[in-house]
Image: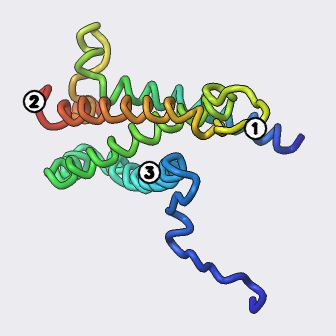
Amino acid sequence: MQNRLKNNLGLWGWLGGGRYGAERYAYALHRITGLGILAYFLMHIFVTGARAGGPAEWDSRMAFFGRPVFKTGEFLVFLAFVYHAINGIRLSLVELGYMVGKPGLPSYPYNYSTLRQRPLFLAMMVVAAALMVIGGADFYFAFK
Amino acid sequence: MRESKLWFWHILSAAVILVLLGVHMGIMHLGAILSAFGIGSRDPVRSAEVF
């Protein structure tokens, strides 16, 4: 254990983008939202597990989790879900080689793949933001 | 080769999850739209729908 390297950067090493830019922050947020969704799934199993207790137990638990604070929590899960899904589609496209261009000789000014796929990143973030706004409107104003 | 197999299972599990979550989305969250077509329920967590 004495030879173990010291983690000099700490949390910033995990979250910081450095020279990698916006996509590195998108990656950090992808991880955070993924863990958030996973945590929600565990709670979701607990909540829906009330079905095993019969109708009275189900109604009681639904009434408890119908409170505004849980509604807000549900909306946060929705935001995480939208970001994770849209960014996941972006990652899949880039992973499969789309929107990164073809490799070429490095000639100045350098146009590396991170820059070439940035329009896709920006477009996907706009799509995610639009879905968040529409979802928020539905969550709090529509179908009530 | 091992990585290729793991990648294949990864993609396959993603496809399965996509289908299951799609069904879940339709049943649990798009009831207002589906009920217009005569399927699903507007309030799928109501006791009468669950039991």
Q: Which mark is residue A33?
A: 3
Q: Is residue A13 above or below residue A114?
A: below
Q: Residue at x 50, y 71 (%)?
A: A11
Which circle's residue, 3 or 2, is located before the other in the chain?
3
Residue highlighted by disc 1: A106
Task: Let me know if marks 3 and 1 both belong to one chain.
Answer: yes
Q: Secondary structure at mark 3?
A: helix
Which one is closest to the eye, mark 2 or mark 1?
A: 1
Q: Residue at x 57, y 56 (%)?
A: A19
Chain letter, disc 2 residue: A
Q: Position of residue B40 (x, y in %)?
A: 31, 19
Left or right: A50 with respect to B1? left
Image quarter where the N terminus of chain A lies is bottom right
Chain letter, disc 1 residue: A
Which one is closest to the eye, mark 3 or mark 1?
A: 1
Q: How many marks?
A: 3
